[in-house]
Image (cartoon, rainbow, N blue to C red):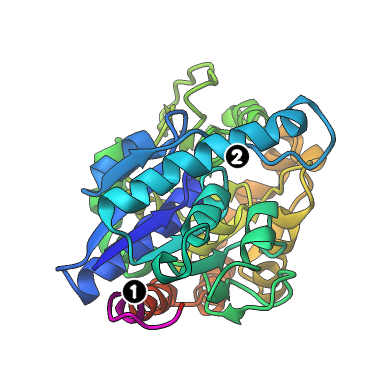
Amino acid sequence: MSIVVAGGGTAGHIEPAMAVADAVRDLDPSIAVTALGTARGLETTLVPERGYRLELIPPVPLPRKPNADLARLPLRLRASVAATRRVLDEVNADVVIGFGGYVALPAYIAARMRPRSRRVPVVIHEANARAGVANKVGARLAQRVLAAVPGSGLDAEVVGIPVRASISDLDRAGLRAQAREFFGLDPDAPTLLVFGGSQGALSLNTAVRGAAQVLADNKIGVLHAYGKKNTLEPFEAECPYVALPYISRMDLAYAAADLAICRSGAMTVAEVSATGLPAVYVPLPHGNGEQRLNAAPLVSAGGGILVDDADLTPDYVARTIPPLLTDPGRLAAMSKAAAGAGARGAAQAVARAGIELAQAHRSGGST
């Protein structure tokens, strides 16, 4: 059998696609898995690193407002669908599993724009609390629609967010010493992890770097991923402030940390909560508000704190983070609440849905 996963662009789309690919491989190593992506996405690095075939197609941005991209949408979509159909033919695809984003909509359309006997079934997974445009359209073409949480706007089965096993099965306490040595952190200091998603976040960088001296005075270690396109002024202190443009070993980053300051994209919330790491979530101040919705259930459960982007200042970090990181009881309670809020087994659920449809397709069943 042959399964195609479509989730390129950002890590928030790629990581659940790779988690499902891993689950497919665990369930049946004989199944061929191909990932769709674009030349400008992180998948050009992340997918080959995970050992999967990557096929590139032209990206199709789906603007929410009238602009030049909207005017170019029909031609872009036509070219991308044509390229995707060629990929599906080449790999003899039995099912497409899509996760939204630039490559998902062309994949959904290409799978269904065939003679009836050759149509490829579609499974959709929506990770956000509010569904994106690609998955809203794709849900009308799909045979199975799955979602992370209720109320996404899709008629979907709720299964949680697919998270790779290295994260969902992470033993933070057991790996802490190894993780801190790996990054050059103080083995005994309370440690703050800061990251703004795969691209970094200027407001998080400014706020935490601006409070660096206060954190150092309180003997707090910092592991800060500031983004490849950003810069961060170095800071030297007795308690290490380790600043990196990108962290590829997020499993070790989670293990090294006692608390995180991060955005609240669906994948970020899923991974952080799966590891039981308490966090200060700072939703993106633009978009359709899905980042605030992603974090809200976890915050209500006591596993995190929600802070508006405009309120995350150096003064806020200096006032809030040292008392929290030096309160083991509160951190333990938040960790327990965070771990309890996550949904395990989502990757396997999505993988099984895809395999079932692929089997039906391969045997000539109706799709």
Can residue 227 be seen here? The reply is yes
Bin the neighbour count of mark 1 within 10 Å (Cα to Cα): few under 14, some 14-19, many 20 and up: many
Spot occupied by residue 105 in the image (x, y as percentages of width and height) = 58, 51
Image check: 36 left or right of 128? left
Looking at the image, residue 109 lies above or below residue 270: above
Secondary structure category for the residue under label 1: helix
Q: Quadrant of residue 139?
A: bottom right
Q: In this view of the protein, which residue sits in the foreground, 215 or 210?
A: 210
Secondary structure category for the residue under label 2: helix
Image check: 211 left or right of 174? right
Q: Return the mark for residue 358.
A: 1
Q: Return the mark for residue 77.
A: 2
Q: In this view of the protein, which residue sits in the foreground, 52 or 260?
A: 52
Spot occupied by residue 56 in the image (x, y as percentages of width and height) = 38, 36
The N terminus sits in image quarter: bottom left
Which residue is at 49% across, 59% downward? 98
Magenta stretch bounds = 358-366
Q: Amino acid at mark 2?
A: Leu
- The residues tagged by marks 2 and 1 sit, at their Cα atoms, a distance apart of 25 Å
Which residue is at 57% across, 61% downward? 327
Instruction: Check residue 361 for magenta coloring.
Output: yes
Can residue 221 be seen here? The reply is no
Looking at the image, residue 254 lies above or below residue 172: above
Q: Quadrant of residue 73?
A: top right
The reply to whether dot 2 and dot 1 touch (C-beta < 8 Å) is no
Q: In this view of the protein, which residue sits in the foreground, 354 or 239?
A: 354
Spot occupied by residue 208 in the image (x, y as percentages of width and height) = 62, 34
Spot occupied by residue 78 in the image (x, y as percentages of width and height) = 58, 39
